[in-house]
Image (cartoon, grey):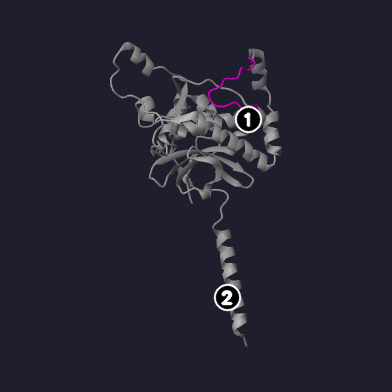
Amino acid sequence: MFNTRNIVIGLISAAAMMTSATAQAGTMPFMPRGEGVGAPAGFSELCRRDTVTCGLPNSQLALLGLGVQASFVPTSSVGAPLQHRFDATPAASAEDDAHLISVATVEAWTIAAVEDFVPAGEIVETAPVTPSVAVAAADTFAPPSPSVLAWTTRAERDQLKLLNLVNQSVNRDVKKASDLDLYGQPEYWALPRLVDGKLYGDCEDYALEKRRQLIAAGVPESALSLAVAVTSRGEGHAVLMISLKSGDWVLDNLTPWATPWEDLNYRWVERQVPGTALWTSAAA
């Protein structure tokens, strides 16, 4: 016959087991995928306009817009009042006109390791590739680069160190501005744009810039994907996701640290299949 003490201990043990089971059931380190969906309209337009920034092989470009309707969730989230407002009033002079249109795309640079990281806006000179070298490279199998091998052998703590470094640097160096401010369009995916010596962009521009820097630092493209969500404020939002051994992490212009995807208060909409034109819904 159970006494009061045994009953209490039994109830505590049962509660502990239920809590443990709930914690395990609610922990999904990798985002579950749903059915195939169309790529975001802004991403498809980017890939047709700028294949380098898009990052897809030519064989994948033909898949854009086939089979499923393109998704249109405007990803204009900046998450805070803009730090700079572009003057929408007519310019008072030709000199002002020149000021408003002095916009240029930033050139590419390379990063070899954490120690060689180059902040957004700086350009690193790279050795030119001769035609003979390019042809030889195209005709032979290219083994993983030393930087990719270095990434795969790093401890996750060191991988997160690089992710946080890139995330915080881009978040700091790129100022928030909407596509409407920069391009006169409600949705325009691109790398951050340089205006009067400063970089500007909205959420997808941050994500594309981080993707480019991480690939240059040796992170394999197969670990990186773009994703679209809706924030708690109801804004369409684009982020960069990276798959580590511990799960899927998010690099976000609204958050300084690389964050497990489940820890963000977002309604996840869709996510790219890494290295392809294919996107799937988020089943979470």
Considering the whole magenta stretch, tell me its main secondary structure: loop
Task: Find out whether residue 120 is within the magenta segment.
Answer: yes
| Quadrant in the picture for the N terminus | bottom right
Front residue (pair 100, 278): 100
Identify the image quadrant of residue 123.
top right
Q: Please state the horizontal and vertical placement of residue 169, each as a whole percent of the image.
A: 55, 32
Q: In the picture provided, is 243 more to the left or to the right than 267?
A: right
* Residue 203 percent across, percent down from the top left: 45, 35
Residue placed most toward the observer, 97 or 249 = 97
* Residue type marked 2: Leu
Tell me whether circle 1 and circle 2 mark residues in contact (CB < 8 Å).
no
Give left or right: position of 214 versus 207.
Answer: right
The segment highlighted magenta reads 116-128
Residue occupying image coordinates x 61% and y 72%: 13
Residue at far top of view: 94
Residue that appears at 42% across and 45% down:
231
In this rendering, the label closer to the viewer, 1 or 2:
2
Look at label 1 and name its amino acid: Ala
Q: Which mark is residue 11?
A: 2
Label 2: element kind:
helix
User: In 3D space, how far apart are the residues under numbered discs 1 and 2 (Cα atoms)?
Assistant: 53 Å
Residue 138 in which image quadrant: top right
Q: Is residue 139 left or right of residue 92?
A: right
Q: Is 184 covered by the magenta stretch? A: no
Which residue is disc 1 drawn over? 217
- Marks counted in the figure total 2
Q: Is residue 224 visible?
A: yes
The image quarter containing residue 117 is top right
Query: x%, y% of residue 137?
Result: 66, 21
- Which is more N-terminal, label 2 or label 1? 2
State the SS at label 1.
loop
- Considering depth in this image, is 265 or 137 the residue closer to the camera? 265
